[in-house]
Amino acid sequence: MNESGVSSSALKRSFYLGIVIFAVFGILLLRILLIQTVDFEKYQEKVINQITTQSPVPADRGKIYDRNGNVLATNITTYRVFISPSGILSAQKEEGEDSKTQYAEIISYGLAQTLGVSYDDVYKQATEYTKYLDRTIKRKVPEETADAVRQFIEDYDLGTMVYLEAQSTRYYPGGTLGAHMIGFTSSDGIGLYGLEYQYDEYLKGIDGYYIMARDSYGNEMPYEYTSYIDAVSGYNLTTTIDTTIQNFLEEQLEVAVTESKAENRACGVVMNVKTGAVLAMATSSPFDLNDPWTLDALSSEELRNSGYSTESQEYSDLSRELLTTMWSNKAITESYIPGSTFKIITSSMALEEKLVSLNETLSCRGSLTVSGIRIKCHKVEGHGPLTYPEGLQQSCNVWFMTLGGRIGIENYQKYVRDFGYYEKTGIDLPGEGNSIFASEMTNLDLAIYAFGQNFNVTPMQQICAVAAVANGGNLVTPYIVESISDNAGNTIYRHETEVKRQVLSKEVCETLATVLEEGVSGNGGAKNAYVAGYRVAAKTGTSEKKTDGDVGKYICSCVAFAPADDPEIAMIIIVDEPTKGALYGSTVAAPYISAALENILPYYGVEPVYTEEEIQNTAIRVANYKGYSLSYAESLIEKTGLKVKVVGSGSKVTSQLPAAGSEIDRSSGVIVLYMGDKPTEEIIVPDLVGKTSVAANQILINLGLNIKIEGVNNPYVSEGNVPSVFSQSIAPGTKVAAGSVVTVEFRYTDADEDPHYRG
C-alpha cells in the first residue's frame, strides 16, 4: 500500500475516467463548435421553422383581355376561412375542464350555419388536428359571407381560433363566353385548360410570403418578429378575340344545334385571313368558367338518364368523361371528314398546275368507275354537261375524281403537305389534334380524297387552308394572343404574322374566289350562305361518320370567306350528328354562316354594297302615320312603293297595321290605315312551312297579311330554283288582325352531296 492510502488500481481507474470525461467534453465542445459554424444555417433554419409560420401571399394572376380591351379573365377578392386547432385547444385549457363553453362545438355549429359546410367535418378538424395552427374550412368565400364570419368571431371572441384570409380568386365576367378557348384555373390558381394553361408561366406571377413568429403556444409574437416579401403580379394577355364576334358565333352555333337536334355538338371559328388572328372560336353548349366542375344541362341530363347509381364507380367514371367532353375544344382537338368543302383545295391544285380551264366542259352521268369500283355523284341521275366552275358550284363528284386523276398521287400529297394538313397548325392552345390520311395512297383513295371523303382533318387545319386561298396563297399560323404586357403597360411580347409558305399564286386564288362567290349568289350548292350587300365565297360539305360503328351519322359543314373580291375574314361552322331536317351542309350549316356574317361583316367595318335588285328585295321599315290626314299619309306611303288599304271613315288616321317600326317586304307590303274605330276582324295564320317563297308570299297577300323575309332571299337565283319556308314567326292557326306581319325564314333545300358515294 502506498503512503496516501490510494491503491494504484484506483488511480488507474481515475485516470481513464478522466480521459473519458475529457473526451466526452471534447466531443461536445466540437459538436457545439460545428453547430455554431459549419452547421449553423441548418440548425438556425430548424429553430426558425419551429417558432415561425410562413404563409404564402399568392400573386395576382395576370388578366386576359379581348382585342378591344374588354376583360375576359380577371381576379376578385374572396376569403379563405380557416381555424387553428391548437389555438382552440389552448383556449379550452384556459377555460378549464369544467367550463360550459365548448369552443370546438361553438365553432363547428357557427361555421356550418354561416358557410353551409358540414358540422361534423369542422368538428373533426377542430378536435383531431390539435397540433396544427391552420386547417382550411372553406375557400372562395364572398365578401358578404366573410362579413358574417367576422361578426361570428367578434360575438364569441374567437380571434385566436377562427381566421379569415383575403385571397385573389379568378373571375370570368363573360361566364360561358369563349369558355373552350379561355379555359380556367384550379382552386390554387394554376392554369388547367385553354389559354390559362397555355400561358400559365406568364399569367401566374411570383408568390410573396408573410412570415410570422409564434411562441410555444402558437400565439403570434410582437410585430418586430414579422417580415413580408411582396408578391409579383403576373403578366396580362391581350388576345385577338372580339367579344362581339364571339357572341355572334356562339349564338348561331346554339341555334344550329337546337334546330338540327345535333347530338355531338357544333363548333366554329372566325379568322382574319391575312394575319391568322382568331377573332372567335366556339363549341356549342359552353360551360360556366366560374363553375367549370359543374356539368352543363345536356351533360347533366345524360348522367341522370344513365341508370347508374350515384354511388357507383360507373356513375363517377361517366361524370368524369362528360366533364372532359364538355371542356373539349372541338375546333382544335377533334378531326372530321371535310366532305365537299375540300373541293376548294382540290380545285386550287388543278388550277395551279394548269390541269383545267374555266371553259372546259365535262359530262356527268352520275358516277365514275375507278379501280373497278363505281363511285357515285350526289346527283345519281347525273348533272349532264358542266363547265369546271359549274362542277365546283354544283359539287359534282365526277368532275373532282377526274381532276384527282389529272393531279396524281405524288402531286396531290405535295399540295396536301403544303396546305398544312400533315402537321398541326401551331395555334397557341393546348391539345391540338392532327389529320388522318392513308399511309399508302392508292388511285381509288385519290379519287375519293379529291372530293373530300374518307380522310380526317381538324376544323383549324381546314380554315387555315381556306384562308390561304382567300389571302392570295399564303399559309399563315393561326394565333390567339396578340401581346403580353406587365401592369405598367410595358410590352414584353407582340405577335408578328407568321407566313409558313406560299402555296398558291394570287391569280389562282382570285379565280377561285370568283367561282365560289358565283356559287353563292347564283345557282350553286352554297346559296344558303348568301348575304345581301356582300360578296361571299363559300362551299358546303356533308360526310358520313364511319368510326366506332357510327354508320348513318353525319357531319355537316360550311366554310366561307368575305368579301370575295378583297377577303378579310374566313369562317367555318361544323355541326356534328344532326338528326332533324335535310342533313346536308347546305341546310344544316350554311344558313348559320349567313346569319353570322350578316352581323359580323358590318361590325368588322366591311361596308355593304347593294345592287338595285338587292335593294328592291330588302325589307322596308314602316313609318308612323297615326294622326295624319288620309291624303297626306297616302302620299307618304306611295313614295315608299308600298300599297295602302283604308278601313273606316274619318278625317285622320287613328291606327295602323303593321305598327310603326315593323319591317315588311318592299315589293308586296300593304299598310292598313284605320280611320275611326279599329274593327275586330281577325285572320287565321296559315301553315307556310315547306311552301315556296312565291307561294308563301301570295298566300299572305291574299289573306291581307304582310310578310317579312329572313334567311336567304337571293334575287339572282334562276327561276324554278326557289327557296322554301323553313320557319314562321306566328304559329299556324293563330288569329291576328289584317295587315299583321308574319316573319318567314327561307332556305334552299338542295343537296350539296350524298355521302353514300360507293355504287
Image: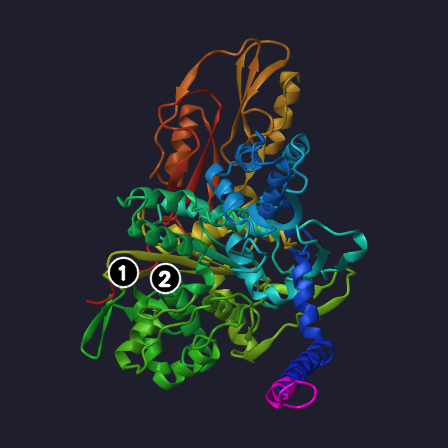
Q: Where is residue 588? Give x, y as percent.
A: 38, 51
Q: Quadrant of residue 563?
A: bottom right
Label 1: how many Cα within 10 Å (few below 14, some 14–19, many 20+): many
Q: Quadrant of residue 548?
A: bottom left
| Residue 183 visible, this angle | yes
Residue that mark 2 sits on: 394
Label 2: how many Cα within 10 Å (few below 14, some 14–19, many 20+): many
In the rendered structure, find residue 274 and report the number of the disc placed on it. Answer: none
Query: Residue 396: within the magenta?
Result: no
Please state if 205 lies on the left or on the right of 347 as rendered. right
The three-letter code of the residue at mark 2 reads Gln
- Asked whether the residues under the numbered discs 2 and 1 touch, taking CB atoms below 8 Å apart as contact, a structural biologist would say yes
Q: Which residues are magenta?
A: 1-15
Question: Along the polypeptide, which appears first: circle 2 or circle 1?
Answer: 1
In the rendered structure, find residue 379 and report the number of the disc placed on it. Answer: 1
Q: Where is residue 477? Give x, y as percent.
A: 56, 72
Query: Residue 2: within the magenta?
Result: yes
